[in-house]
Every structure is written in structure tokens, then in C-alpha cells.
Amino acid sequence: MKERIEKLLAEIEELKAQKEQEIEEIRIKLIGKKGVVTQLFDEFRNVMPEEKKELGQILNKLKVSATAKIEELRQLLENEPQAAESEYDLTKPGDRLELGARHPISITRSEIISIFNKLGYAVAEGPEIEDDWHVFGALNFPPEHPARDMQDTFFMSTGVNPVLLRTHTSSVQVRAMEQMKLPIRVVCPGRVSRNEAISARAHCIFHQVEGLYIDKNVSFADLKQAVLLFAKEMFGENVQIRLRPSYFPFTEPSAEVDVSCNICGGKGCNICKGTGWLEIMGCGMVDPNVLESLNIDSKEYSGFAFGMGVERIAMLKWQIRDLRLYFENDIRFLKEFQTSV
Ligand code: DAH
């Protein structure tokens, strides 16, 4: 009997269970009404009195360890997370990653740049936080020019050559003339800031692409040809351009460029306000004063410059009526511009 008990004790040590039901079976087998331990207790009644003390002790030990083992198996099972009850369902399909799209301003900027790349223009970039000299001084703005007004320009310091947020990327043209070897043929894309009240037609930040071409014998006819080629690439082969005399401190003569309205084909609609024409950029021949202030001999060299607002071109391209849409990042708006560009 002693040997059977010891063998059972060893077996109990090794017991394992994965399910509630298995534990119940073990319990019945060991300490159930007809279980082995219960049977041993029955047999114990008949053992010789001199053996009772020793056997009684190990028999009790057997019952205690059988009960303890069953309890231990129950605890283990309870603490172990059940696959079916787990909060993670590993068989579920994963979350889909939504593919983003390029912003309409980025798409339009790339398109403008690639048109001018084809015409031989390189890209030049410069700082958004600039000084007065690069934004105004070198571009022939007299000291009292209203563009320098606090109402128009965000100044970041005062003094002789104050630091400010550039109001146009013409400052990059100045940097190109300071740094590059002649001839120069560049486009300057970038963000600009002006102290404007935000509305459907104006914002305090927007984007420009400006261009500059300086070489010997550059004429107004070359400027007109470059502008026409750009307009055709951007708005279609049938587009027409018109140049209206204008004024910029850094160009002389200066002009505003209109394209025939791509909505009504020039007949007149509410987009072109009945005129048949849409304004797209400013341009002109670089003022000799600008060339001279940057140590370029204006007797030998001449050049033209132009500048356009990217938001405006995108508005005309897609008939976007409110400038604020570009900055609000409403996904419903951005999703309309799925493109591979
Ligand atoms: N800088 C002008 C503006 O921000 C646009 C412009 C006009 C740029 C004529 C030029 C230019 O380079 O020649 O309104």
C-alpha cells in the first residue's frame, strides 16, 4: 500500500490539464466517491494497527497533495488567457492604410516648374525669412514705397536692413543675380507672406513661382514668347494671351498677362466677370537699376522677369472658388486631386 501511495504521489506531481473538463476528470479519478484516494482510505481501515501511524500520515499527505494539485490546475487555467476569449482576434483582417494624394498647390507648382524646365530654366530657392535688401532694396523699391508698410509686410526686426517674411519670391531672383554666373535662366518657387485679411480671395500666406532670364540681347519679344509657350502648356494649345501695361519697381516696361478664359472660351462668364480674360501673372524687362545694383552691366546684358501665384493658377485650372480651401486640409477637398504627378 505504501508503494502505491508513493507512486500516486509522484504521478500527481506530474499532472497537467488544458481544459476545465480534464481537471474535473482528474478530481473524480482521485478524490471522487470511487476515486483512488477514496478507495485507499477504505482499505486503510483494514491495515494492521502497527502500520496505521505511518500509512495514515502518507495517506493524508496524498489527499492534501491531490486536492492542492487540483486547485493549482484550476488556478493555472484561470490565469491563462483563452485563445477564444482574447481581445485580440488574430484572424481579423488588418486596418487598411489609406493612400494620400498630393496637395493641389504641389501638383500645380510641379506642373509650372516642369513646363519651364522644358524651356531650359533651372530651379532656384531661397529663404522665407529674408532681409529688406533682398525683398525690396535691390529690386528698386524706394525707401518710402507702400509695399514696405507694416500693413503689408510682416517685419521681424527694425533697423537699417530689417528682417521680414518675404512678400514675393523676387528675393530669390536677387540671390540668383548675386550668386550665379551669367547667363541666368531660373524659376523661383516658394511660399510668401503678406499681412492680408483672410477671405475667399486673399490669404496671409500663398505660393509663387517667379522666373528670371538674363543674357545678352534679351528682348520683350522673348518675354512674350516664353509667356505664350507657358500658357499653351498650362491651359491648352488654343489659349490666347494678352499683355496689359502695368507697373512694378523692378521691371521697365512692365505688364500684366491675361489668358483667354478657359471656362467660356472668351465669350464672357462669371469666372472671368464677363471680360473673357483671366489675369495670371505680372512680368516685364528687368529694370537697368536692378541689374546695376547687382553689378551686372546693363549696357551689355538685359533680361526679363515674371511672377505668378500658384493658388491663382490652380483656381483657374480646377475652378476652385475659395482660397481658404487650400489651407484647411479638409480631406474631402484634397481627395478630389488624385494624381500620379
Ligand atoms: N513680385 C510680383 C508680385 O509679387 C510679381 C512679379 C511681377 C514678379 C513682375 C516679377 C515680375 O518677376 O517681373 O506681385
Image: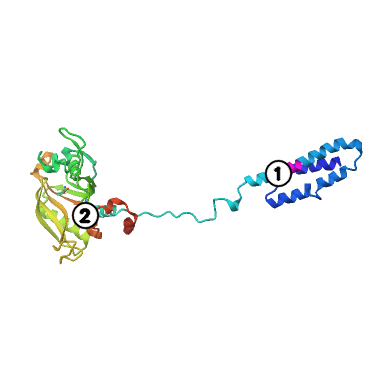
Q: Magenta residues, as a range?
A: 65-69
Q: Is residue 77 left or right of residue 141?
A: right
Give SS at disc 2.
Answer: helix
Q: Residue at x 80, y 49 (%)?
A: 35
* Residue 305, position as x, y percentages in the image: 15, 49
Give SS at disc 1.
Answer: helix
Foreground of the two, 5 or 148: 5
Would you place residue 36 above or below residue 264 in this image?
above
The answer to which image quadrant residue 7 occupies is top right
Q: Which residue is mark 2?
A: 312
Q: Is residue 59 left or right of residue 153?
A: right
Foreground of the two, 276 or 174: 276
Q: CA distance from mark 1 to mark 2?
A: 78 Å
Mark 2 burial class by Cα count in 10 Å: few <14, some 14-19, many 20+: many
| Amino acid type assigned to the residue bearing label 2 in the image | Arg
Would you place residue 245 above or below residue 4 in this image?
below
Q: Quadrant of the C terminus?
A: bottom left
The answer to which image quadrant residue 260 occupies is bottom left
| Amino acid type assigned to the residue bearing label 1 in the image | Glu
